Image: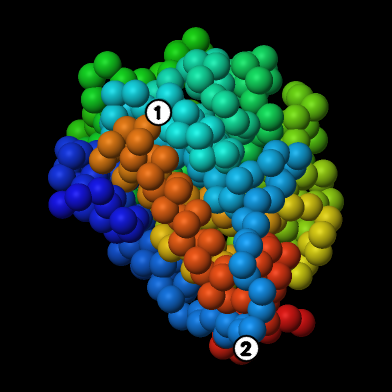
């Protein structure tokens, strides 16, 4: 097969490259994987009621999110353990994100030090944060991200424990020899080892991640740095309003790629009510299930400022390193550009909710 021309072809190439355990770790969802599939199926249920006879001779897919200029409204969502996909790991990913003109959100569970990732970046890097039971270690991690030059903190709030990913249980998932949670090595929390009856990462979360995290802790987290704070993992309008009230600078509508609570609402279905609830108080981003340029159109039409992709980036990384990640981001940008033209939408501002059908699920209030 030649160069992949769709995200699904990159996934097929990645499957041929990765170990079975690594592929299952990246690809799997929780339990019966209904939420994983629903993220994708929910996009397919939305049709586009395109406009005609609009001048689309030029299109502009660029945008700004929290002061960051993006060449297109597609950013790199946080995903863990990139060195399982390619020896260059997160360094390849951040270089590709810079070449694509977008943001990379670096996972707390990176195989590469945050300082090295930011040093290799030519675009903005945001740092995704899990809060550990050891709050001193958490504060030190935030300070490292600040000192390294990260431009925002993205707090994940939907993982007090790890979802039951049955493929990982069967594989007894653990990090291969030589790989670690690099940023947590100074605190002694760098090992994700093999367990006799469960996923090593699930055991890691149960032992180390703080399940008592609550809204009152947002003030403490904000006190650690002056960086913008986004809250990731919100699917309810009331939680979105609470996030704004506690001082969040942005919201990421996300169900963790269907990897946490199975049968959870699809993120594109959650998006519209959340946008309606918070208005323009903060930037609202979304991830989960985005595989085509038309998916980007639907998410932006529903009110998202930008969309994140996670697994597609890993498929590109496994298939061809930095060039593969860039290939994924560029094909989504090209698909978005074509979809904008065919929708009669020359700018992102013209991707409005009236483009979406059926009205029963997508109409503006």
Cα–Cα span, label 1 and label 2: 42 Å
Q: Secondary structure at mark 1?
A: helix
Give the residue displayed 45% in from the left and 48% down from the top: 330
Vertical arrangement, residue 81 with respect to residue 292, above or below: above
Outermost residue, top direction? 186
User: In x, y percent, where is residue 163?
Assistant: 41, 50
Mark 1, Cα crowd under 10 Å, few <14 / some 14-19 / many 20+, is many
Q: 57 or 292, which lies in front?
A: 57
User: In x, y percent, where is residue 165?
Assistant: 32, 50
Give the residue displayed 60% in from the left and 31% down from the top: 123
In the rendered image, which quarter contains the C terminus? Answer: bottom right
- As drawn, is 249 to the left or to the right of 309? right
| Mark 2 lies on residue | 359
- As drawn, is 243 to the left or to the right of 125? right
| Residue 211 makes an appearance in the image | no
Vertical arrangement, residue 52 with respect to residue 325, above or below: below
Give the residue displayed 63% in from the left and 61% down from the top: 59
Picture quadrant of residue 182: top left
Q: Secondary structure at mark 2?
A: helix
| Mark 1 lies on residue | 92
User: In x, y percent, where is residue 179?
Assistant: 31, 20
Give the residue displayed 51% in from the left and 20% down from the top: 120
Vertical arrangement, residue 56 with respect to residue 323, above or below: below
Point out the tag, 1 or 2, that comes first from the N-terminus. Answer: 1
Total marks shown come to: 2
Q: Are marks 1 and 2 in contact (CB under 8 Å)?
A: no
User: In x, y percent, where is residue 166?
Assistant: 27, 52
């Amino acid at each position: 097969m030649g160069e992949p021309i769709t995200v699904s072809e990159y996934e097929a190439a990645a499957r041929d490259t990765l170990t079975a355990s690594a592929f299952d770790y990246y690809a799997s969802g929780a339990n019966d994987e209904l939420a994983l599939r629903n993220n994708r199926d929910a996009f397919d249920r939305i049709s586009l009621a395109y406009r005609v006879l609009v001048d689309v001779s030029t299109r502009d897919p660029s945008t700004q999110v929290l002061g960051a200029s993006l060449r297109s409204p597609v950013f790199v969502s946080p995903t863990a353990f990139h060195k399982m996909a390619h020896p260059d790991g997160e360094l390849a990913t951040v270089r590709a994100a810079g070449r694509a003109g977008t943001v990379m959100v670096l996972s707390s569970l990176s195989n590469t030090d945050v300082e090295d990732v930011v040093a290799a970046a030519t675009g903005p890097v945001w740092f995704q944060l899990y809060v550990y039971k050891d709050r001193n270690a958490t504060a030190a991690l935030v300070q490292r991200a600040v000192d390294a030059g990260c431009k925002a903190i993205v707090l994940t709030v939907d993982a007090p424990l790890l979802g039951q990913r049955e493929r990982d249980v069967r594989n007894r998932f653990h990090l291969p020899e030589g790989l670690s949670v690099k940023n947590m090595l100074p605190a002694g929390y760098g090992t994700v080892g093999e367990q006799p009856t469960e996923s090593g990462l699930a055991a890691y979360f149960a032992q180390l991640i703080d399940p008592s995290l609550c809204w009152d802790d947002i003030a403490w987290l904000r006190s650690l740095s002056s960086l913008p704070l986004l809250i990731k993992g919100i699917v309810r309008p009331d939680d979105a309003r609470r996030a704004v009230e506690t001082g969040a600078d942005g919201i990421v509508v996300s169900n963790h790629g269907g990897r946490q609570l199975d049968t959870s609402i699809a993120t594109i279905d959650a998006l519209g009510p959340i946008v309606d609830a918070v208005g323009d108080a903060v930037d609202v981003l979304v991830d989960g299930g985005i595989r085509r340029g038309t998916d980007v159109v639907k998410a932006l039409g529903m009110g998202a400022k930008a969309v994140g992709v996670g697994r597609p980036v890993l498929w590109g990384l496994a298939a061809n390193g930095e060039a593969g990640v860039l290939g994924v981001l560029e094909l989504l940008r090209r698909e978005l550009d074509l979809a904008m033209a065919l929708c009669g939408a020359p700018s992102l501002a013209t991707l409005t909710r009236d483009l979406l059908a059926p009205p029963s699920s997508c109409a503006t209030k």
